[in-house]
Image (cartoon, coloured by chain):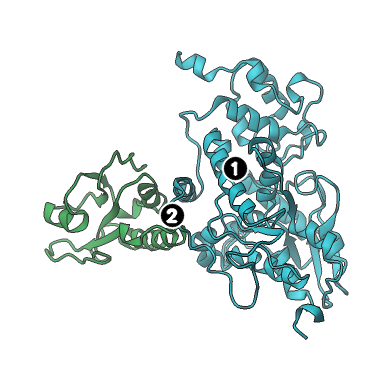
Chain colours: A cyan, B green
Amino acid sequence: MTEQERHSLSLPEIKCETGMLEGKSAPDDSKCPVAKYRDEFVPSRLIDEAKTGWFPKGIRSCIGCELCSPSKDASFPMCVDTLVTAVGRRDEFIPLAFGGALDSIVSLQLINKYKQNRLGWIDNGIHVAGEKDKSDVGLFVGAAPYLDVLLGEEIGFNPTDESRAAVDLLNSIGISPVVLPNEVDTGADRLHEGDSEAFIKLGTINRDLYKSRGVKTIVTTCDDCCYTLRSRYRKYIPGWDFKVMRLADYLLKFGGRLTFLSAKETVAIQPPDMYTDPDGLDSVRKLLKKIPGLTIKEIESGHPSTFGGWGQFDSVTKRIETDFLKAAEKTGADTVLIPSTTMLVRLLEGRRPGSWEETSIAIKGLYQFLSAQHTVHEEFAGA
Amino acid sequence: MTAPRSQNKKGLLFYCTRLIPDSELEYDIFGSGDIVRIEIPCSGRVGIGEIMQGIAEGYEKVAVLSCGEKSCLHGFGCTEAKKAYEKAIKLASVAGVDTDRLVFIEQDLGNSIYNTNGLK
């Protein structure tokens, strides 16, 4: 097989379940946040390029935000996944976050012989299911313990603080979630590199670990993890039959008795979109409405709720992040609440205190905010 | 700069181009066995990514040989390399990897005594 043949694709190979490649539905280029800054990136043109049987290299710039997808059944990011996995790993430069440190951690997790020490953030103030206990609900923490090491000191925020807040909120509605001591990465970055073998292996490890603890529902504080666990795992990991929910959705559905202290503050939130809220639950707003005295402002729509999970730390995503924060500032709110850990880390990382990009609006994690505001129900306070 | 695949090599050594790693020092770090040596313009070029990649590629030990803080030609190389090494130690610890597999050596030029920081 020649080099040229290896890189070429046949249409049956790239036939996408979304039907996007058959031309039944086309992505809406005008909504693409990447196309705004990267002229050569036009989603519909990339699909046309793929139809010729060649791998459209530019597709790697997709941040997977779903904004251009015409409907739930015709997802452009899913189409990107199909194309990337059809070609497999290619010898081309793919930028990796933290110089590849996190990718190396994934490689170590794939060896699956190391006993991780990733639960250092669990203190006596919160309760998780014991190592041998079973529970219906599991909390997916993702790379947060590693991001604590990589960024905690620099940005003055530990991503596991969001996980801690999540456990605290779950405790307040009477749930002690399963937090896996040997949980592995979702593998979304590996999938995007074309390494579907590693992605499936990681997914299988997570599936077996959750099954062994009797988990039925997985909740997460990270929208990127949630998207991968809900959409990609269902497609690629056999036997992945868990219900995957954002923590906000879970709290809205099962946290009826959750009550909050009043707060005289104005906060900005992002309107729901197909990436974070495919079922249109609008749970973030509904949860915040339970806080007496809180004023909620909505950021104008059209901003993505992810900045790409696969090493896109380039000038384009930086400008998308800046646009998002400018829109948040425009609302006149004191604080912008971010319901996704990855997005929160990206925003805080780029705007460290004292840097020229420091913003006038405070950036906070939604779950830490909720955790600080909620009152303890008598039943669970041991009263 | 990426760490080459180990192919059952015992150690990976990143060293500043101003230093010459001698066999005695290498034996102290890695014991007997094959070593892959990577010469770099300054130890400050070794990031957390390279150190972790060395571990992930299967090297038994990954070492960084740096000039001393005072003798670094660029002034910041040793400090940066140390920062990367310290973070790599923490990261390896969370990942469940034996931190003895990571070694940092600070060697002052013209001084035959090695500062065997992190050396067992």
SS for dot 1 = helix
**For the residue marked with disc 1, what is the amino acid?**
Ala
* Circle 2: element type: loop
Q: Is residue A76 above or below residue B32?
A: above
- Label 1 marks a residue whose chain is A
Quarter of the rendering containing residue A91: top left
Q: Position of residue A229 (x, y in %)?
A: 67, 46
In this orientation, does residue A135 appear?
A: yes
For image coordinates 77% across by 30% down, the residue present is: A27
Q: Is residue A41 visible?
A: no
**Residue type for callout 2:** Tyr
Within 10 angstroms of label 1, few (less than 14), some, or many (20 or more) residues?
many
Choose between A131 and A366: the one closer to the eye. A131
Question: Do marks 2 and 1 share a subunit?
Answer: yes
* Residue at image mark 1: A188
Whether residue A376 is situated above or below residue A88 in the rendered picture? below
Which residue was labeled with disc 2? Answer: A114
Quadrant of the drawing holding the C terminus of chain A = bottom right
Q: Is residue A224 above or below residue B100?
A: above
Q: What residue is rendered at 63% in x and 27% in y? A: A83
Report x, y in % for residue B105: 25, 61
Give the mark, 2 or 1, whose residue is nearer the N terminus: 2
The percent coordinates of residue A190 (x first, y second) are 54, 40
